Image (cartoon, rainbow, N blue to C red):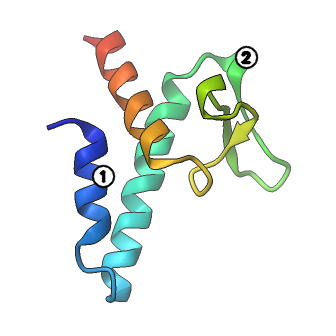
């Protein structure tokens, strides 16, 4: 099962409870931090308020993305890419 499927399954479960929403938000932020650390320093940074950013891949529109704005499919693909490069 790839990361995109896992993230989507997590997204559908327990959507009405505040604890479930908070848990998914924390998992998404943790995944984004893993992506941020695995991204070359020329392609990552942070906004003045301290929000971590990475350059989005062109096929997802380019520009800067944050933990809140990155799409589920890009998040999953980038996690898979980092996993392949570290093994």
Residue 7: horizontal and vertical position, in percent? 30, 52
Q: Quadrant of residue 60?
A: top right
Residue matched to label 2: 42
Quarter holding the C terminus is: top left
Residue in view at x 57 percent, y 51 percent: 67
Return the residue nearer the eye: 59 or 15. 59
Residue matched to label 1: 7
Residue in view at x 48 percent, y 32 percent: 35
Q: Residue at the far left: name it.
A: 1
Q: Secondary structure at mark 1?
A: helix
Number of dots carrying numbers = 2
Q: Are marks 2 and 1 in contact (CB under 8 Å)?
A: no
Return the residue nearer the eye: 72 or 18. 72
In the picture, measured across the screen, residue 60 lies left or right of residue 24, that is: right
Residue count near mark 2 (Cα–Cα under 10 Å), binned few <14, some 14–19, many ≥20: few
Residue in view at x 71 percent, y 30 percent: 62
Residue 74: horizontal and vertical position, in percent? 48, 37
Residue 56: horizontal and vertical position, in percent? 64, 31
Q: CA distance from mark 2 to mark 1?
A: 28 Å
Q: Is residue 82 above or below residue 60?
A: above
Q: Residue at the far right: name it.
A: 48
Quarter holding the N terminus is: top left
In the picture, measured across the screen, residue 18 lies left or right of residue 50, that is: left
Where residue 24 is drawn, which disc sits there?
A: none
């Amino acid at each position: 099962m790839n990361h995109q499927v896992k993230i989507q399954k997590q997204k559908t479960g327990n959507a009405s409870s505040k604890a479930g929403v908070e848990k998914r938000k924390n998992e998404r932020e943790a995944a984004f931090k893993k992506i941020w650390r695995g991204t070359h320093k020329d392609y990552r940074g942070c906004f003045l308020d301290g929000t971590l950013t990475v350059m989005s891949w062109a096929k997802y529109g380019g520009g800067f993305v944050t933990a809140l704005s990155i799409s589920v499919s890009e998040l999953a693909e980038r996690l898979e890419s980092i996993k392949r490069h570290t093994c």
